[in-house]
């Protein structure tokens, strides 16, 4: 099950983003429906035909994946990673490597717990 979580997490994060975007679009459509029902019905018609129909099927499938996979996903790790995102910055420095040196060690600060084999 651990291997499943490793490769499914990035797909799940994408699915959560697509679902959030779909919810925003649905809220905007609801607002449009309250203001101008004719325009909202035209939007519904446009979504149900042409290239938008298969795209809407993909959005529904990703929303289902986001909901169904949520209990098995590492929520706390994803939230902690997002909280650290503003603190990310490039590291600059100079290291002098002596000539003809094998396996020269360089100090590097990173979170080893976030690396995978």
Image (cartoon, rainbow, N blue to C red):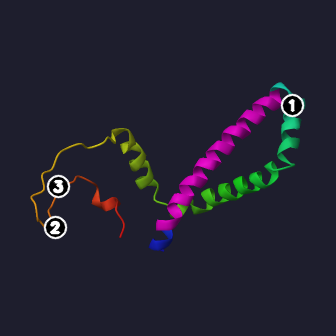
The residue that label 3 is drawn on is 107
**Residue at x 88% of width, y 36% of height:** 42
Instruction: Judge whether 61 appears above or below 24 on screen.
Output: below
* Circle 1 residue: 39
| Residue plotted at (75% across, 52% down) | 55
Q: CA distance from mark 3 to mark 2?
A: 13 Å
Within 10 Å of disc 3 (Cα), the crowding (few <14, some 14-19, many 20+) is few
Q: Range of the magenta residues? A: 6-34
Please state which of the two labelled residues, at mark 3 or mark 1, is closer to the viewer: 3
Graded by Cα atoms within 10 Å as few (under 14), some (14 to 19) or many (20 or more), the crowding at tag 2 reads: few
Name the element at disc 2.
loop
Quick one: label 1, few (<14), some, or many (20+) residues within 10 Å? few
Examine the residues drawn in magenta and state their main secondary structure: helix
Number of labels in the image equals: 3
The residue wearing badge 2 is: 103
Q: Position of residue 13 (x, y in %)?
A: 54, 54
């Amino acid at each position: 099950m651990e291997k499943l979580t490793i490769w499914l997490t990035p797909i799940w994060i994408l699915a959560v983003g697509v679902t959030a975007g779909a919810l925003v679009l649905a809220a905007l459509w609801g607002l449009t429906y309250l203001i101008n029902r004719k325009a909202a019905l035209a939007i519904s018609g446009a979504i149900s035909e042409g290239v938008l129909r298969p795209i809407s099927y993909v959005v529904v499938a990703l929303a289902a994946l986001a909901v169904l996979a949520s209990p098995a996903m590492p929520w706390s790790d994803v939230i902690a990673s997002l909280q650290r995102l503003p603190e990310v910055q490039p590291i600059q420095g100079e290291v002098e490597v002596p000539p003809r040196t094998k396996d020269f060690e360089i100090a590097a600060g990173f979170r080893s717990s976030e690396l995978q084999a």
